[in-house]
Image (cartoon, helix red, strand yellow):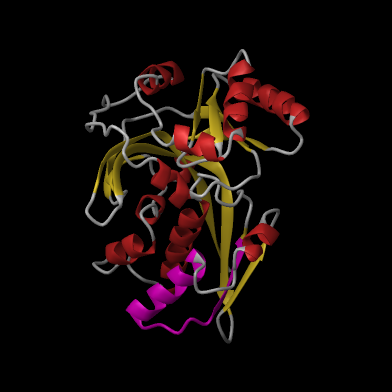
């Protein structure tokens, strides 16, 4: 059996920079990965099988987990067709991340599936067919393949190395209510678009990261919070914790994150927030952990 970790993707900032003729927004965002996420398992089978387990399996099944619209299934069939291999595997997805949460779960799952099938079939990691397949699956899939911090531009397909960053204790919070990415972007149309910025080459501490992020925004926040006002409650809950250095929504929502100086402080804040809001998903993690790469 081949096991691949599919980490949560966190948008540290997200700026809308324009809109293309096809309606897609262009953006610039700084992406990091946390050491919490889903798990993809691949093992031999007579015929293709796909199953979902884990705390958020039922929610995914309601959205058609076994249909050809599922990104894991699309990734598996897409790669098999390109490399002309029989899809004689059982792919089991352990769904640990909330659905439609702004943490790139589906994109990370698809990238992990491709990574695992490449290993299963003994394929080269860098091949000409790979990039078109990744971008066809979704704008966030390419950045999730190697799970390295990246600066993403265009519709997400233009990638460059992120500034060097230390490990950061982070607290992730989701209200367990989905937030439609398409609707958030639609409501964000007509905003004043920003010019691309040039981040510094690196940060030596969480305080330097926070100082930089305070000069940036998530341009989707207002639209997402209008659709789902609970997002503002999460930000308020994080900012109320005296040890929280910074709080922001990730991606198009509804997950938000808070930075802390130590993991102990993040865990203490997580216990308080979870105790006050038992219907929320609250998880501590490390951001930018080298073992992920």
Write the residue at 47% across / 59% down.
112
Q: Is residue 121 magenta?
A: no
Q: Which residues are magenta?
A: 71-93
- Image location of residue 62, percent across then percent down: 65, 64
Along the line of sight, which residue is nearer the eye, 150 or 116?
150
| Corner quadrant of residue 209 | top left
40 vs 27, left or right, is right
Write the residue at 55% across / 21% down.
260
- Image location of residue 85, percent across then percent down: 40, 82
Write the residue at 57% across / 26% down.
235
75 vs 269, left or right, is left
Q: How many marks?
A: 0
Is any atom of residue 160 visible in this view?
Answer: yes
- Image location of residue 135, percent across then percent down: 32, 60
- Image location of residue 220, percent across then percent down: 42, 37
Quadrant into which the C terminus falls: top left
- Check the image and report above or below for 26 versus 117: above
- Check the image and report above or below for 153 versus 117: above
Along the line of sight, which residue is nearer the eye, 226 or 8?
226
163 vs 206, left or right, is left
Q: Is residue 78 magenta?
A: yes
255 vs 58, left or right, is left
- Check the image and report above or below for 89 versus 162: below
Extreme residue toward the top, this view: 242
- Check the image and report above or below for 163 versus 264: below
Is any atom of residue 288 visible in this view?
Answer: no
Write the residue at 46% across / 49% down.
183
Quadrant into which the N terminus falls: bottom right
């Amino acid at each position: 059996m081949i096991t691949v970790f599919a980490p949560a993707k966190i948008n540290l900032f997200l700026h809308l920079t324009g809109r293309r003729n096809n309606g897609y927004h262009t953006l610039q965002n700084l992406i990091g990965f946390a050491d919490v996420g889903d798990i993809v398992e691949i093992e031999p089978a007579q015929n293709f099988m796909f199953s979902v387990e884990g705390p958020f399996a039922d929610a995914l099944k309601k959205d058609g987990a076994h249909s050809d619209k599922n990104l894991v299934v699309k990734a598996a069939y897409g790669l098999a067709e390109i490399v002309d291999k029989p899809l004689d595997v059982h792919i089991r997805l352990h769904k640990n991340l909330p659905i439609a949460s702004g943490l790139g779960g589906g994109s990370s799952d698809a990238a992990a599936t491709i990574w695992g099938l490449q290993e299963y079939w003994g394929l080269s990691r860098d091949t000409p067919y790979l990039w078109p397949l990744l971008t066809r699956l979704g704008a966030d899939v390419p950045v999730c393949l190697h799970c390295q911090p990246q600066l993403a531009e265009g519709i997400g397909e233009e990638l460059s190395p992120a500034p060097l960053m230390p490990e950061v204790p982070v607290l992730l919070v989701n209200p367990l209510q989905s937030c439609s990415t398409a609707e958030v972007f639609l409501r964000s149309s007509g905003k004043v678009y920003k010019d691309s910025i040039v981040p510094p080459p690196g940060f030596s501490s969480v305080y330097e990261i926070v100082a930089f992020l305070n000069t940036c925004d998530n341009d989707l926040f207002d639209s997402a919070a209008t659709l789902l006002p609970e997002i503002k409650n999460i930000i308020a809950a994080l900012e109320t914790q005296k040890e929280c250095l910074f709080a922001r929504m990730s991606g198009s929502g509804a997950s938000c994150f808070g930075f802390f100086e130590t993991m102990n402080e993040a865990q203490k804040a997580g216990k308080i927030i979870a105790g006050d809001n038992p219907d929320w998903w609250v998880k501590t993690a490390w951001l930018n952990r080298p073992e992920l790469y």
